[in-house]
Amino acid sequence: MTGQKKILDSLAGYFSKLSARERYIVLIGGAAFLFFVIFFALFLSRRQPAGKKTKIDQLAEQRIQLSKTAQEYAGLRQVVDLVDSRVAKRPADFDLYRKVNELIEATTIRPFVVKMDPGSVEGKEYLDEEYVDLNLQRIDLRMLVNFLNQLEQLPGLARIGQLSIKTRLDNSKTLDVVVRISAYKEKQ
């Protein structure tokens, strides 16, 4: 306390020795200095660093991201609804191997079938996959396209999972084909 009192007394003594005109100049200078210090303190506190975003900017970006996510969800929801409806239409006694065999007979491609292996893969959550690997040799392109088109019309969410087509070296008009036909059913 005594240190502050000494400083104030010395300033008051200095100020009392000044003329009226000098006191007026010191007061105006001090007020101007105080005004600029307050102004810059307020100005700098409101100004944000270049890398930081305001809360409003962050909320606007979050809103845009939310609308994109909602659109993605709507698209995926349509796909899930389509899959659910196709799985629901699957007959209870649907046997993919038997259906593919019937289709092979109906499209008269039996002479080109070299191998036909059934298999299944247990799904992780909702659907199980059953498949038939089909190996065809020396088949004509038109017959293959006709067979694949009819194959996609099978009930039970049948799809062509893998397809490999190679032209034969001995006859470029015929093809060797390996195809995986898959169908899905609800997990039991």
Image (cartoon, rainbow, N blue to C red):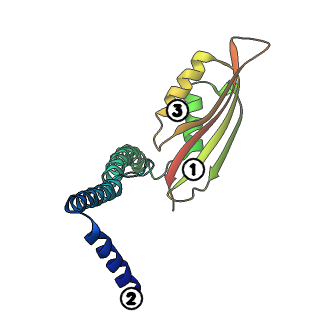
Q: Are marks 3 and 1 in contact (CB under 8 Å)?
A: no
Classify 10 Å Cα crowding around label 3: few (below 14), some (14-19), many (20 and above).
Answer: some
169 lies left or right of 154: right
Q: Secondary structure at mark 2?
A: helix
Q: Which residue is mark 1?
A: 129
**C-alpha span from label 2 to label 3:** 102 Å
Q: Which sits earlier in the primary sequence, circle 2 or circle 1?
A: 2
Classify 10 Å Cα crowding around label 2: few (below 14), some (14-19), many (20 and above).
Answer: few
Query: x, y (%) of residue 145?
Result: 55, 21
Q: Which residue is mark 3?
A: 151
Amino acid bearing label 2: Thr
Query: x, y (%) of residue 138?
Result: 71, 19
Amino acid bearing label 3: Leu
Classify 10 Å Cα crowding around label 1: few (below 14), some (14-19), many (20 and above).
Answer: some
The quarter of the displayed image where residue 39 is located: bottom left
Q: Which residue is mark 2?
A: 2
